[in-house]
Image (spheres, coloured by chain):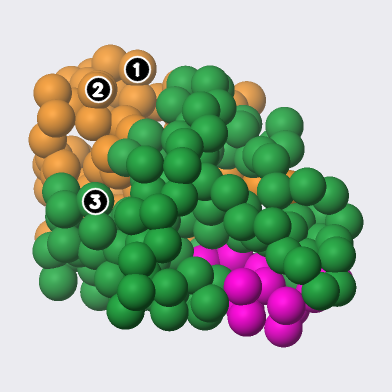
Amino acid sequence: MLVIRRDLVDAMVAHARRDHPDEACGQIAGPEGSDRPERIIEMENAERSPTFYRFDAAEQLKVYREMQANDEEAVVIYHSHTATEAYPSRTDITFANEPQAHYVLVSTRDPIEHELRSYRIVDGVVTEEPVKIVES
Amino acid sequence: MAVTVSIPTILRTHTKGEKSVSAAGTTLAEVIDDLENNHGGLKARLVKEGTLHRFVNVYVNDEDVRFSGGLAAEVKDGDNVTILPAVAGG
């Protein structure tokens, strides 16, 4: 189960809406081993595409160094789907390299109602998990 | 020529869980060959048909090697090599 503060959920959805129709992507860091997302980092989508995302490599290194210095890890890795449901695509599964992360998908295909779901992706196997939103 | 190589979580099965290991070489290709000698299996995760995998980022210090020669990128004694899998999808 992903337990996450409402303000972080709102921030992911706002980021996804802002970048629509391109996919938005980012991560939420938390203390290493805590499984507690705390600090949202909106990442540049180097692909700037409605169908693909990739963290900008230079920004990824900078953020990785920050997280190492703070004893943090990526607790949540999120991105948006702008025309399809919030379910991992085949490419999402191929490139999922963080077995400890919660992969959050936000769909912005409906202009009013977003869809937000969370998954574990380990060795190519997708397992959906409940999302428990707690007040900030 | 010894360099320090940071290993991402997903590849630590090849380094007995070590987060960073040392390796020798004057180019990235030599460093990867040396890694392979001590941590078998790593090379295949990084290199395909003579070039770096498209979805692996490798940096020498702060430089993305994609912009400094790829496998031919030079490394100097004391450099830090960081390997990060690309975070990508569709």
Between the C-alphas of marks 1 and 2, the distance is 6 Å
Q: Amino acid at mark 1?
A: Gly
The percent position of residue A100, horizontal first and vertical second, equals 32, 40
At x 28% / y 16%, what residue is drawn? B40
Q: Residues within 10 Å of mark 2 (few under 14, many from 20)?
A: some
At x 61% / y 73%, what residue is drawn? A13
Residue A49 shows in the view: no
Disc 3 sits on a residue from what chain? A
At x 62% / y 78%, what residue is drawn? A15
Between the C-alphas of marks 3 and 2, the distance is 25 Å
Does A83 sit above or below residue B55? Answer: below
Q: Which residues are magenta?
A: A13-26
Tint of chain A? green
User: Is B43 left, or right, of A48 in this rendering?
Assistant: left
User: Is A111 left, or right, of A43 in this rendering?
Assistant: right
User: Is A136 left, or right, of B70 in this rendering?
Assistant: left
